[in-house]
Image (cartoon, rainbow, N blue to C red):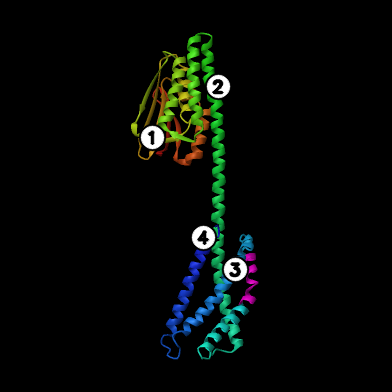
Amino acid sequence: MQRDAPNRALFGLWGLFWLLMVTVEVQDSHDNHGIQWWEPYLWEGSSCLVATFWLLLERRVSARWNEYLAQPLRWFIKHLLWLPVIAVTFIVAVYAIRHGVYALADEVYEHESWSFIFFYESLKLSLYAGLWLGIIFGLESFERWRHEREQLLTLQKHLAESQLAQLKAQLQPHFLFNALNTISSLMQVDVARADRLLTQLADLLRASLQASARDMTSLRDELKLLELYAQIMQERFAGRVTLTWNIADEALNAQVPALLLQPLLENAFKHGVELSRQLVAIGVRAEKHGDELRVTISNSDSSLSTAPASGIGLRNCRERLELIYGARASLRLEQDGGGVSARLTIPFRSP
C-alpha cells in the first residue's frame, strides 16, 4: 500500500507523456502525404509498448534499490548500469515490431542505417531515461519522507499519551494525600465530621477513578468532580470560605482534559483559605469566548508571593496542556485585586 501513491502519480505522468508524444508525431506527419495515417501511431506506439515493459520491470525490482534513496548517486548508478542492456533490447524490440507490422501490411519499413539508428536511439533513450529516473527518484523520495514523517508523528503521539498517563498517575496520589490530610486534621476534634468527610471522600474517589479512565471529559462532568471536592473542603473550613459558581450554559458541553481543574481549585483552598484568618471567597467561572473556553478559579485574601506556581498540581496541568494543545492553550496565575486568579484558556471543542 505504501507504494500505491508514487506508482499512481508515475503512471499518470507516463500516460500523459506518451499521449503528448503521439500527438506531436501525428501533427508532424499530418502534412506529409507520403505517410499513411497509421504509421505515426505505430512508431510511437511501439516505443511506448517496449518502454512501458521496462518501466513495469523497474517497478517490480525497485524496492531492492530504494534502500539507496538516501544516497542519490548510488541509486542512480544502480539504475544506469542497466542502460546498455535496455538500449539494445529497446532498439531491437521496437524495430522488430515496426518491421513486422509493415510486413503484415505488405509495406517496407525504411529507415536510416543500423549504425545511425543505434547511435541516435541510444542517445535519445539516455536523455529520456535520465528524465524519468529523476521523476521516479523524486516520487520515491517524497513517499519515503511522507512515510517516515507519519511514523515520527505516530511515535510522538504514543510518547505524548505515555506522558499524559504518567502525569495523571502523579495527580491521583497527590490528590488523595491532600484529601486524607484534610480528614486527619479533623479526627482529633470532630469525629462525626471526619466520618462524614470519609463518606464524601469515597464518593469523590469513585468519581475521580471514573474520570481518570478517560483522557477528555465534558466540563459538566468535570464540575461535578469539583463540587464533590469543594464539599469536603467546605466541611473542613466551615465558616471560613464561601464558594460561588458562575458557569455559562453554552460552556457545559465543552471537552476538557479529565481531572485538570481539581488542582486549580485545590490551590485556591491551600493558598487562600488555609493561610487566611478572614472569610475567603472562592469563585469558579467558565464561559465560551469565540472559539475558546475560558475558566477562572479565583480566591480572595492571597497574593502571588504566597501562591507559588511550581507545585506538582500546576506543573502537571501546564505539561498536560502543552502535550494536548501546544501553544493554543494557556494557564496563568494573576494578582486579582486582593486575591489570585488562575486563568485557563483552551480551544473550545464539543463532543
Q: Marks 2 and 3, how far apart in space?
A: 66 Å
Query: Image height check: is 236 above or below 347?
Result: above
Q: Main secondary structure of the magenta part?
A: helix
The residue shown at (55%, 85%) is 100
Whether the magenta-drawn stretch holds residue 77 is answered as yes
Whether the magenta-drawn stretch holds residue 146 is answered as no
List x then y, in percent, for residue 34.
45, 91
Quarter-of-image position of residue 239? top left
List x then y, in percent, for residue 192.
48, 10
Q: Residues within 10 Å of mark 3 (few under 14, many from 20)?
A: few
Quarter-of-image position of residue 224? top left
Give the mark, 1 or 2, whose residue is nearer the N terminus.
Answer: 2
The residue under label 4 is 5
The residue under label 1 is 253
Q: Is residue 242 visible?
A: yes
Query: Image height check: is 13 above or below 292?
Result: below
The residue under label 3 is 58
Q: Residues within 10 Å of mark 4 (few under 14, many from 20)?
A: few
Q: Amino acid at mark 1?
A: Asn
The residue shown at (53%, 79%) is 46
Give the extent of the magenta segment.
Answer: 73-86
